Image (tube, rainbow, N blue to C red):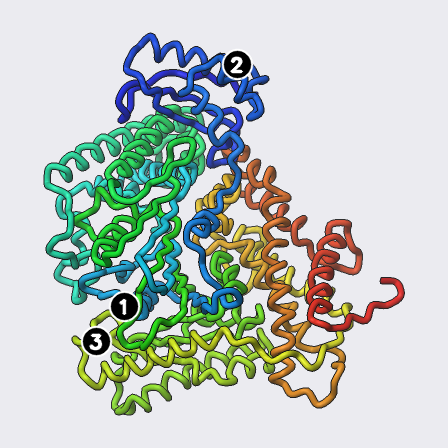
Amino acid sequence: MGDYTASKTRSNRPGWSIQFRHPLRNDSRGRAGLKMRRGLGTSDDMEADAMVAQMNNILSDTSWWNASKRKEAELLFSKPVIEAFYNEIQAGHDDPEALRESHIRLPNAEKDGYSRVLFVGTTGAGKTSLLRQLIGSDPDSDRFPSTASAKTTIADIEVIQAKGPFEAAVTFFTEFQTQANIEECVIEAALAVFEKAPIEKVAERFLNHRDQKFRLNYILGNLRKDDGVGSQDEMSFDEDDTVRGLADETVLTEDERAANRVQLEKYLEHIAQLSQSIVAELQADLGVKLKAARQDREAAQQLIEENFESRLTQEEGFHELVQDILEDVRARFDLVNVGDLQHRRSGWPELWLFKSEDREEFIRQIRWFSSNYWPQFGRLLTPLVDGIRVRGPLFAEFVEGAPKVAFIDGQGLGHTPDSSSSITTHVTRRFSQVNVILLVDNAQQPMQAAPLSVLRAVASSGHHTKLAIAFTHFDLIRGQNLPTASAKRSHVMASVLNALSSLREALGPSVVKAIEHGLDTRCFMLGGVDRQFGKLLPRAAEHMRGQLGQMVEFFETAILPPPPARACPSYDPTGINFAVQEAVSKFQGPWLARLGIGSYVGYGKEHWARVKALNRRIAGELSPSYEYDTLRPVADLIMQLRESISRFLNTPIGWTREAIDEQEEQAIIAHIRQLVDVELHNLAVKRLVEDHLNEWRNAYDKLRGPGSTDDRAVAIHGIYDVAAPLPGAVMSQASAAFLADIRRIVISAIRANGGDVRLNEAE
């Protein structure tokens, strides 16, 4: 048990604040003792000292360390002390989607006759521009949701088309998640100082998180006057929302920007001092010198870099700085003076609700939570938003009536180099919850690796009948051999069929045939999705209206129930054993290569810092998907199990009715795949993360110093080896338990769909 004490401090808040490490709250590394700072609501020194003494009384007596003691504590201690210690003392995993649901329900097909449409696609393919067209959001006057050529949509955006007033429910990342992101930004900036990067590079590392999902410059502003105007330089030929504003748009004054720059300079100066101090300490402790001969200098630099983060995060000055930045971020919510901003018991914002009959006013207010308009940098709350749900008459002019459609848009997938790469579980979990999976792809370079990965995931999880593809940039296809729209469409569709052919080995010929069936009618060729129809040539506008109209019609009919199954498959469960063996081998092999323990074709060793970043995300439970960038162990295991089991399901040993055609077979097997996929998501999280959380935390926090990179790799592989062991001729207890879990999932799914599993007498 650590030694916990409290102290008073001055911060951005008026009056005194109290700061302490909470013995019952884990930090972003999974260690007990989360650094906290809370306002005391007083400027009186003696009153503040009295409350600090009360907190030290609580911290020194473990009998108070229980939520059930709150009532008793309220009789003895001041309210600010009680709230600082007991608020959210039992906070577990938050469910922001459930919070949005409690205020604006996401309608479904069964109860409401609504079709849910999930947008999936690579960054820059035009997902959000297409969503704008479908909800009648003017790209010039509305600019909602925001678009840009880089990553823009980082929160889930859910749009429900319905008559009535405009309503919004916006949920925010927790204080814990925000603090963890700030910590990572400070660490990256401090490393940039260590690398002797110029001040602009240090500021870039600090203000833009490495994964581009958390951008402090949106909230705190930029260091230089011209920062954020990069998209207006001489190499920019297009406009996006970062440069296109409205005449009546609220922007920051130059005084506000100047004040932000002064504060940023203070933060960067503090970071530089911390970095220089840590490097000096490490040189002394490790016995190395950065001014040594070249070979020794490179070894010294790597050794210091490997230990830099651990030493930095032990410094009290680091946590003081993070708390200062966190309070600065929190202060931006004070500028929200419209709608109902609700807070957690700790005071951190949790939910913003807004309702209006005026569309223009509604869009103007929602943009504070979704915009990327650079003149507003320093006040935008976009990076703090977990999800946005809006409901209202958001209808496109090209569709008659009021379609019952709910759209779900999220972050782009990124341009993966390999079609066998896994898709984040944040996306694949949604497959079972929607009626349409709309893959948005670029018609100029169709069906590259990332879209192919989506096709693999959709097909192997049994959701291929939900698939539709929207090809954007269709108007930009050029070629003397493509003189007509029909020729261009044939060119794109040939790429689709060619891409599907490449998946035959992974998915099986019958699955690929099932995807191909009727796919032509579910592919839509779109051009100019980022422009108003009035700015398109008449024939182009007519083509767009026709394609978008057909797309909406497909959305509406997607809720129709499939015909009932007239036959059921029979399976020999022995094949499950071989499917699991194949899946685990394909999961373990690439990870052995990534960790630098073994080799696997097509995979190399990941940089130690990326592996450590993944370790930190899992140890601190910072990501519900338990991943870092393209390092996705949970998604990888799900993908390999899903595909191997899909191939097993594709070859039953018999059917209850003869003369069943291949299309009907795949429709029946697809329902089994869907049930299996849902359970695989739950199983992978439990076995890879939840059952081994202490091991993940030990691998991150306790492995440091020379050789820690290799030790961490071995520790992580050890987790994988127990969580997903390779079945063999001699079964270990762990292998038998894992195989039993998979068999239970598959057999239950088969039987739930009327299928038969022929167990032998021993089973």
Mark 2 residue element: helix
Residue assigned mark 2: 60
- From the top left corner, tell me how far across and down residue 285 is, in percent: 44, 25
The reply to whether dot 2 and dot 1 touch (C-beta < 8 Å) is no
Q: Residue at x 74, y 85 (%)?
A: 657
Image quarter for residue 549? bottom left
Q: Determine the CA span between mark 3 and mark 1.
A: 11 Å
Q: Nearer the viewer, mark 3 or mark 1?
A: 1
Q: Nearer the viewer, mark 2 or mark 1?
A: 1
- From the top left corner, tell me how far across and down residue 665 is, in percent: 65, 81
Q: Residue at x 17, y 76 (%)?
A: 534
Disc number placed over residue 533 in the picture, else none = 3
> Residue pushed farthest right?
761
Disc number placed over residue 136 in the picture, else none = 1
In the foreground, 560 or 229:
560
Q: Determine the CA span between mark 2 and mark 1.
A: 60 Å
Q: Is residue 418 left or right of residue 650?
A: left
Mark 3 residue element: helix
Q: Determine the CA span between mark 2 and mark 3.
A: 68 Å
| Amino acid tagged 3 | Phe
